[in-house]
Image (cartoon, helix red, strand yellow):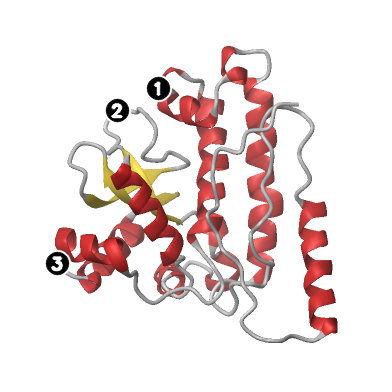
C-alpha cells in the first residue's frame, strides 16, 4: 500500500513538570487508543491520521464528544470515500499536493473527499491544547503589517467565518499572487490550494471548519460562540512555522 505523508505536523511535545507513573500510564493508554481508532484504512492509497492530542485535549473550548465524532466518523468517511473515488483512475497515483492543484480536472467525488481529507488533517494541527493567545516573531510582524494589528486581523477572520453561508471554511493564507497574508473563505470542502475558478489561492496558515458538525453538539446553531472558543486553541507556533516555510519558498 502506498502511504502519503503529505502534511508535516511540526508539532513539538515536552514534559514541563514531573508527573506521576499513573498519569503517564493513562496518557500511554490514551495514545494507544487513538492509534487503534486511527489505523490505516486498507482500501486505497490514503490513510486517516491520528489526532495529535486526546479527544478531550481541547476542552473546555471544544468538547471531547465532538472531536471523537468529527475525527472518527466525518474525517474517516472522507478518507474512505476518497479511496473509493480514485481507485482505478489516474488520480490514484497522484500525490495529495498534485491532486489539489489539479482539482478543476477531477470528479466531484474526488473534489469533495480530497478536500475533506486535507482540510481536516490540517485543521487538527491548527489547534492545540493550551493554545490561543497571539502569534510571535515573523508571523506577528506580518499580521501587524498586512492587517494593521492582531485585533483587526481577528475581527476580519471572525467576520469571514461567521458570514460563510452554509457549510465551509475560513482561512488565513499567504496569498499566491501578492505574497501577503489574507483572510478568505471556501464553500463545502474546497480549500485555497485548489485550482478552481474564483478561488483565492494561497498557502493555508490557519483553517477553521465552520460546518455544523464541528460545533453543533456544544453550541447548537450558535456559530459565533464556537468561533470565539476557537481563538483559545489556535496553534500559533505551528502557524508561525508554516508562515516561515511559505516565505522561504
Q: Is residue 171 left or right of residue 155?
A: right
> Which residue position is annotated with label 3?
148
Mark 2 against mark 3, which lies toward the viewer?
3
Query: Which residue is located at x 63 percent, y 72 percent?
Result: 57
Which image quadrant is residue 175 in? top left
- In the rendered image, the quadrant that contains the C terminus is top left
Classify mark 3: helix, strand or loop.
loop
Which image quadrant is residue 148 in? bottom left
- In the rendered image, the quadrant that contains the N terminus is top right
Classify mark 2: helix, strand or loop.
loop
> Which residue position is annotated with label 1?
104
> Which residue position is annotated with label 2?
197
Residue 123, percent from left and from top:
51, 54
In space, the residues marked 2 and 1 are separated at their CA atoms by 8 Å
In space, the residues marked 3 and 1 are separated at their CA atoms by 35 Å
Query: Which residue is located at x 84 percent, y 68 percent?
Result: 29
Amino acid at each position: 500500500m502506498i502511504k502519503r505523508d503529505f502534511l508535516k505536523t511540526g508539532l513539538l511535545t515536552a514534559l514541563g513538570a514531573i508527573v506521576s507513573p499513573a498519569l503517564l500510564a493513562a496518557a500511554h493508554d490514551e495514545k494507544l487508543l487513538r492509534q487503534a481508532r486511527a489505523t490505516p484504512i486498507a482500501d486505497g492509497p490514503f490513510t486517516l491520521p491520528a489526532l495529535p492530542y486526546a479527544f478531550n485535549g481541547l476542552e473546555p473550548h471544544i468538547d471531547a464528544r465532538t472531536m471523537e465524532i468529527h475525527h472518527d466518523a466525518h474525517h474517516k468517511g472522507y478518507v474512505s470515500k476518497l479511496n473509493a473515488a480514485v481507485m482505478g483512475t489516474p488520480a490514484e497515483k497522484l500525490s495529495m499536493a498534485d491532486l489539489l492543484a489539479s482539482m478543476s480536472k477531477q470528479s466531484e467525488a474526488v473534489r469533495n473527499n480530497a478536500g475533506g481529507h486535507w482540510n481536516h488533517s490540517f485543521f487538527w494541527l491548527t489547534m492545540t491544547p493550551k493554545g490561543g493567545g497571539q502569534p510571535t516573531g515573523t508571523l506577528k510582524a506580518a499580521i501587524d503589517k498586512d492587517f494593521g494589528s492582531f485585533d483587526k486581523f481577528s475581527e476580519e477572520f471572525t467576520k469571514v467565518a461567521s458570514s460563510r453561508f452554509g457549510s465551509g471554511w475560513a482561512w488565513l493564507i499567504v496569498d499566491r499572487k501578492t505574497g501577503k497574508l489574507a483572510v478568505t473563505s471556501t464553500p463545502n470542502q474546497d480549500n485555497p490550494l485548489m485550482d478552481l475558478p474564483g478561488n483565492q489561492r494561497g498557502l493555508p496558515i490557519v483553517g477553521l471548519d465552520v460546518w455544523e458538525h464541528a460545533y453543533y453538539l456544544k453550541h447548537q446553531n450558535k456559530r459565533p460562540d464556537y468561533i470565539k472558543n476557537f481563538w483559545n486553541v489556535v496553534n500559533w507556533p505551528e502557524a508561525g512555522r508554516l508562515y516561515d516555510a511559505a516565505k522561504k519558498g
